[in-house]
Image (cartoon, grey):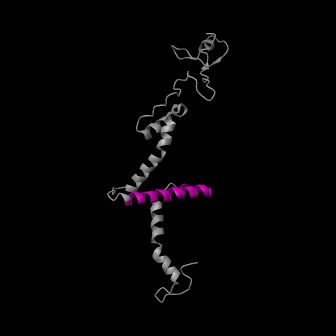
Amino acid sequence: MSKHMTGEVEAMQSSKPEIINYYNETKDGVDTMDKMLGEYTVKRRTLRWTLAFFYNMIDVTGLASFIIYREHNPDFRKKDQRRNFLKDLAKQLCMPSVEARSTKRMVMRNRFLRAAVEMVLGGHTATPPEGTATNPKEPHGSRGATPIVGSCYVCRDQKRKRRKTRKSCVACIQPICDEN
């Protein structure tokens, strides 16, 4: 059942139905929200409606959390307050994931990922938890096998077979096979 059941037309200058005048009086909230969502958005062009819906959810959630935070903290009146709030919110939301990834050797091998993780963590990476392999000679993986280091440098220099090995020389850290 609707609030406006009758088709009454007001005798004012506009001669519009009552429902149109009511909408025009109360639409300011939606227009204000649309304007605020347009200032800072995560929306990107996409052909998938589910992704567009997700982007809109993130935008509305960020705006709602900012409004709630501002109402509970009346002294929060800085320049670029919403932008800084959204940056802090995003950083706090992704921090557990970044810290977890910083302990993984494969992620930290890539220099670009390592630099990004260090930038987010403030210049230092989290220390790997005890029991994780940081030395490639130590066993790791689901089966406990060590990774293949390379081909034996002694056999390679003597023009023999290229033997793949999992061992390396203690002194020079070069790959070396069992025969040498």
Q: Which residue is drawn at 47% across and 61% down?
A: 37
- Give whichever of 163, 120 is nearer the camera: 120
Residue shown at 63% from the left, 27% from the top: 143
Check the picture and name the quadrant holding the N terminus: bottom right
Bounds of the magenta span?
Answer: 43-71
Between residue 155 and residue 82, name the one nearer to us: 82
Task: Left or right? Give the position of 80 relative to 20.
Answer: left
Q: With 36 as the anchor, is 146 left or right in this view?
A: right
Q: Do we see residue 24 in this rendering?
A: yes
Residue 54 covered by magenta stretch: yes
Q: In which quarter of the image is the C terminus?
A: top right
Residue most toward the right?
Answer: 161
Residue 82 within the magenta-colored segment of the rendering: no
Residue 46 can be seen in this image: no
Measured as percent of width and height from the top left, residue 164 is found at 64, 19
User: Would you identify the image quadrant in which residue 65 lies?
Assistant: bottom left
Q: Main secondary structure of the magenta part?
A: helix
